[in-house]
Image (tube, grey):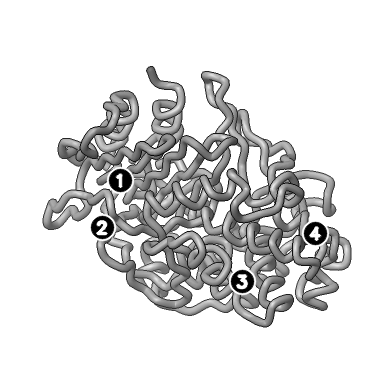
Amino acid sequence: MTVRTSVLVAATTVALTAGFAAPALAAGADTHEGTRQAARAAVKDGVPGVTLTAKDGRSTWSITAGTGNLRTHAPRSVDDRYRVGSITKTFVSTVLLQLEAEGRLSLDDTVEKWLPGLVHGNGHDGGRITVRQLLNHTSGIFDYTADETFGRTYFLKDGFLEHRYDTQSPGDLVAIAMAHQPDFAPGTSWNYSNTNYVVAGMVIQKVTGRSYGEEIRHRIIGPLHLTATSVPGTRVTVPRPSSRAYSKLARTATGPTYDVTELNPSLASSAGEMISDSADLDRFYSALLKGRLLPAKQLKEMKTTVAAPGIPNAGYGLGLMDRKLSCGVHVWGHGGGIHGSSSEAVTTADGRHSVAFNFNGDWSGDSDAVVEAEFCGE
C-alpha cells in the first residue's frame, strides 16, 4: 500500500537508513531470538526504531531497536505511546457489538435508520447498507483517504506542513466520500474503506448520545485499565513517554525525512485516531479473544470473516482480521498506519499469546516478518 493510502489502513509495510541500538530484554524472559532479529532487520532496512511487547501466558517480553529521535539519538522505550491508526477499528467494532448485545441496535440495521441522509449521492444509498457491512468493509462506500485532493492536502509534504493542525469533522470526511461513486453495490465485494468506520463512530454517537471516544473510555479503556490508551480527538501531541514519528511525505520511499509527530488526528476520526502502547494493546486483544469484552454470540459474529482480496492468507471479520501464518498458526488482530507510525497487534485465538509493536516511520520495514518470527520461530 502506498504511504498516502496507508494512513488508516489495515496493514502497512514500511523503511530509512539508520543504525540500531541493542534491544532491551525483560528480565527472565525467553530469548525470542527470531523476533529480535526481525526487529533489527526492520531498522537495518530503514525504520528509525521499533518497540515491541509480547505476552505468552504469564510471561511478558519486551524489546526495542533503533532510535526514537533522529536528532538526539535517544532510544525507543518499551513504554512508548504511539498512534495506532486502524487498530482503532477493533475498539469501535467492539463497542457496536456491545450495543447489539444490549439490544440497542442490530447489525442488520441500515445506516439510514440511524443517520438519515448522511450516506447518499453519486450512487451511495444508506438505506441499502447495514452496520455489519460497515464493519466488514462490504458496504462499497468510497474511502475518503483515496480522494486525490485529500491526499495532496494531508499526506504529501506541501499540503501536510500547511494543514497538519486542521480540524476535520466526521461529517466533513463522509462528505468527501460522497463526492465519489461507490466502489461496488453493497454486499457484492470487499474493499477497505476508512469511511466505513467514520460512519460507524457516528452510529455509536447517535445510539448512545455520547461520542465514540467516550464510549470506548467507558466500556474498554476503564474496565481493562488501559492506562496508556487514549482517544485524542483534536489533541495534536502524543503523551509521554513517546518517541518522534517520521515520514517521507511523498509517494516514494526516498528523499528527505520529516518529523510528523504533531498532527491533528481528527483527519482519522473513528477510523484511526487512537493512541496506545504495546502492553495495552496486548491486554486489549487478549481480553477480547478470551471473551471478556463480548458475549459468545457477538464474539462469534466479530470472528466471522469474509475474503479480503489483496491481503494474503487473511479474512476480515468485524474490525478484526484472521491471518494464517506460514507455520499454520492463526492470529487475530489488526494493523494500523498513520503519519510516521506503523503498528501491528495480534493474538492467538485463545488470547494466550499476543504481540504488539510499532515502527516510528511509515515508508519501510516488514511487519509480517516480525509476526512470523514471534509465532513461528523456533
Q: CA distance from mark 4 to mark 3?
A: 23 Å
Front in this rendered view, residue 93 or 251: 93
- Kindly state the secondary structure of the residue where label 2 is placed: loop
Could you tell me which residue is drawn at 63 percent across and 51 percent down? 319
Relative horizontal placement of residue 294, taking residue 226 as reference (left or right): right
User: Picture quarter containing residue 204?
Assistant: bottom right
- Kindly state the secondary structure of the residue where label 1 is placed: strand
Quarter of the picture holding the C terminus: top left
Q: Position of residue 153 (x, y in %)?
A: 47, 68
Q: Earlier in the sequence, mark 1 or mark 4?
A: 1
Q: State if disc 3 and disc 4 touch (CB < 8 Å).
A: no
Q: Nearer the viewer, mark 2 or mark 1?
A: 1
Instruction: In the displayed orientation, state which residue is furthest to the front.
Output: 58
Q: State if disc 3 and disc 2 touch (CB < 8 Å).
A: no
Front in this rendered view, residue 219 or 209: 219
Q: State if disc 4 and disc 1 touch (CB < 8 Å).
A: no
- Kindly state the secondary structure of the residue where label 3 is placed: helix
Q: Give the amino acid type for the residue marked by disc 1 in the picture.
A: Thr
Q: Nearer the viewer, mark 1 or mark 3?
A: 1
